[in-house]
Amino acid sequence: MVLAAGAAIGVVYALSPLTILCVLAMLVIVRLAVRGIEGDERRWILLIVVAAVVARLAAIAALFAVTNHAQMPFRSFFGDEAYFIRRSVWLRNVSLGIPIHGADLIYAFDEYSASSYLYILALVQVLVGPAPYGLHLLAVVSYLGATLLLFRLVRSTLGRMPALVGLVLLLCLPSWFVWSISVLKESLFFLMTASCVGLAVALVRTGRWWRRAAIAVLIVAIAAGLETVRAGGAVLSLGSILLGYAVAWFVSHPRWLLIGCIVVPVAAGAALSRPALQYRTVKGLWSAAEQHWGHVATPGYVYTTLDARFYPDRYVIEDMHADEMMRYLVRSFERYVTVPLPWDVQSRSALAFLPEHMLWFTLVLFAPFGALFACRRDLLVAALLSAHVAVASVTVALTSGNVGTLVRHRGLALPYLVWLSAVGICELVTSRAFAPAGPLSDDLSHGLSHLEGTCP
């Protein structure tokens, strides 16, 4: 039996070395995730994680099985994936001196969608050979690592039950299931931002100065890497961390919080009274509105947030009045939450997305309660999670205009929103103020309280 298993692993490694390496990486990640956890909780976590991994491996294996490789070299889940895979193979061939077509050489270094992610994929394939299906497993490893990193952080700070609820949601949500097996940069970006969150907590709670210095340098390095993966990634990550630190500090110092509530609006009003700063602010909103206009002009299902007069000609945006700008801001945030509206479903894929969209509404509803309850458990972690949700939501809400792109980019905030919502759900379910009276309610509250354990 052992010999047969070893032979099978050897055959798989010969066919796809990256597959074996990724599976080994998953085993290490899962082992680290359950370290120090015993009993029923450990068994539940292992069951959830193993089931999620097996489902992803099955989906990738099915993609390989249904592909006629005599007609095409590989198949992908999305068109964008095929583009990334091809470009990474071209870059690999260039680095190894393998001749490629002149047109492929041009496209390999095209500025469109240029990202360090392409070079990471190329480097992996330089080391292990062409791996159009193994790259899917690399995405699974990144996503699994990010999810379990946040799970461990939330479990040790916000409670065991919210951590378990968040883990189930992130591993089972259909949209994130799809992104986690795709050769797109979502999984890598998630891993890098989640690492920054964990390091930001360690930076504050590490006693020795040299460790803090090392962690600070590492955070800046990861942020610089994020900028090369996705434009604006460094600002999103560092801005979220700094905002989280500021929120945690002010909330932990009530007097300064009161002073800030008075001083900040006055200072902001005084600053915005200066024409130069007014122009920069308005110009920034014009730029965001123009990006939204560009998304509306793309093929597919779109939605609008500007007044109707701006869509025939994008240059009219610079003639936007104050009341029109206010309507644009209000519509942007409202449609960030509500689009696609159930009664505006225009395709079968949108109809299939409706159950998850209803879950999205539930998460948004419980998130404010969760943020408040989480502040009582661990103020720093709650502030960092909330800041990541806020910064990502504002960035996406003001610029999106395509329904599919919005659903995809909402994923920048969703992995952090989930944990806050999980805290709110668990707290409200166990609260007698919200739970109906009766034996069933008492049993449920007792069970959840037992799973949560002692909170910091």
Image (cartoon, rainbow, N blue to C red):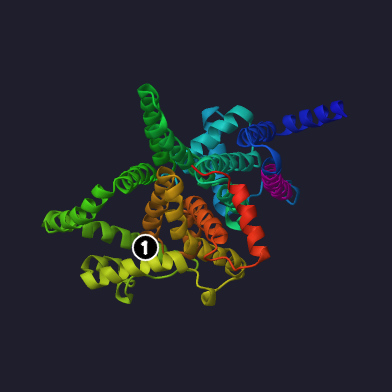
- Residue 429: where, in percent of width, then height? 57, 61
Hey, what amino acid is under mark 1? His
Instruction: Indicate whether residue 45 is drawn in magenta.
Output: yes
Q: Residue at x 65, y 67 (%)?
A: 438
Q: Which residues are magenta?
A: 44-64
- Residue 200: where, in percent of width, then height? 41, 37
Is most of the magenta stretch helix, strand or loop?
helix
Total numbered labels: 1
Helix, strand or loop under label 1:
helix
- Residue 241: where, in percent of width, then height? 37, 42
Q: Is residue 410 visible?
A: yes
73 up-or-down from 340: above or below: above
- Residue 248: where, in percent of width, then height? 35, 45
The residue where tag 1 is placed is 292
Residue placed farthest to the right in the image? Answer: 1
Asked where in the image residue 214 lies, by quadrant, the reply is: top left
Q: Residue at x 27, y 69 (%)?
A: 326
Toward the viewer: 310 or 68? 310
Q: Is residue 130 visible?
A: no
